[in-house]
Image (cartoon, helix red, strand yellow):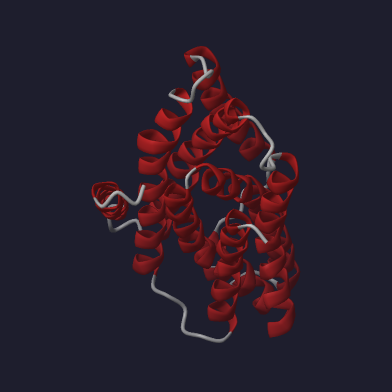
């Protein structure tokens, strides 16, 4: 098994951690969840704009028109997909006054929505790690961090609707599997024989997807979950930690 594919599997598997917390452990506070989402957004923004896109644009044979065009394609493609999906959020698990039938429907829609969102994240993790292992580790970390509250989001209402911990964990893990399927699909389509220009084009599109995911999903969601605190603190912390780690790696000659 390739290392990029293994990273994708581990990132998708973080959904299981959130699922277990959702049915067995003490639910993290809204403040912690919001900070974690902002932290993940900060990591994704810095890597996408300061590393992935520049690397793609400076790949030999890659034209600026193609590079920026693929970046915009990733942005617009994400927003188009997002508008077509049922939009359910993790704070729905707080709605204790829902009838079981309504709660079950909410849980199923939430599972579907998160699964479809997770697929391009799996592609992003695999493609990035295939091109640059250090960046791939950063993306995998960011994805894993925000997959934990996603697992919690699916398992919480499903457990409330069915009363079954196993069903709740199963459906949460099913949403995480979409990310692993995305990585496997990328592995099959973008194997080691693919040209550097194709990888750079895909990386530029993935950068657009990650930027859109951060500003349209993670940051607003952090604000909704904890309206009394500024999600920018988590974003800035994520950028700072990721920037320092990349600086240390580069100064040590590892990357």
Residue sitting at x 41%, y 65%:
33
Image spot of residue 138 (x, y percent): 42, 53
4 to the left or right of 41:
right
Can you see residue 229?
yes
The quadrant of the image that shows the N terminus is bottom right
Q: Position of residue 196 (x, y in %)?
A: 58, 30
- Residue at horizontal 55 percent and vertical 62 percent from the top: 11
Q: Residue furthest bottom?
A: 24
Q: Position of residue 56 (x, y in %)?
A: 48, 29
- Quarter of the rendering containing residue 163: bottom right
Relative to 144, residue 202 above or below:
above
Describe residue 255's horizontal placement relative to residue 97 as left or right. Answer: left
Q: Is residue 163 visible?
A: no
Instruction: Give the left or right position of residue 142, taking residue 197 as reference.
Output: left
Residue found 74% across the figure and 78% down from its top: 167
Residue drawn 56% across and 86% down? Answer: 24
Residue 120, compared with residue 34, is above or below; it is above
Q: Is residue 174 left or right of residue 56?
A: right
Q: Which one is in front, 171 or 127?
A: 127
**In the figure, residue 89 lies in which quadrant?**
bottom right
> Which residue occupies the foreground of this view, 105 or 81?
81
Residue 105 position in % (x across, y down): 74, 62
Total label count?
Answer: 0
């Amino acid at each position: 098994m390739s290392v990029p594919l293994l990273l994708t599997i581990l990132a998708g598997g973080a959904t299981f951690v959130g699922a277990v917390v959702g049915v067995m452990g003490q639910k993290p506070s809204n403040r912690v969840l919001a900070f974690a989402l902002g932290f993940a957004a900060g990591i994704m923004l810095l890597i996408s704009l300061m590393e992935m896109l520049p690397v793609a644009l400076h790949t030999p044979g890659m034209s600026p028109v193609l590079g920026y065009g693929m970046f915009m394609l990733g942005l617009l493609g994400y927003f188009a997909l997002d508008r077509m999906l049922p939009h359910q959020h993790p704070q729905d698990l707080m709605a204790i006054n829902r009838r079981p039938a309504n709660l079950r429907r909410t849980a199923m829609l939430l599972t579907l929505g998160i699964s479809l969102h997770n697929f391009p994240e799996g592609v992003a993790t695999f493609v990035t790690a295939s091109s640059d292992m250090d960046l791939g580790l950063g993306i995998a970390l960011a994805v894993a961090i925000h997959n934990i509250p996603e697992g919690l989001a699916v398992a919480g209402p499903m457990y409330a609707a069915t009363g079954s911990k196993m069903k709740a964990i199963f459906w949460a893990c099913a949403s995480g599997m979409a990310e692993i399927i995305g990585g496997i699909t990328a592995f099959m389509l973008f194997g080691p024989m693919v040209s550097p220009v194709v990888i750079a084009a895909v990386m530029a599109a993935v950068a657009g997807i990650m930027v859109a995911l951060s500003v349209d999903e993670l940051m607003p969601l952090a604000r909704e979950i904890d309206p009394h605190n500024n999600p920018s603190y988590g974003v800035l912390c994520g950028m700072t930690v990721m920037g320092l780690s990349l600086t240390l790696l580069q100064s040590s000659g590892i990357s």
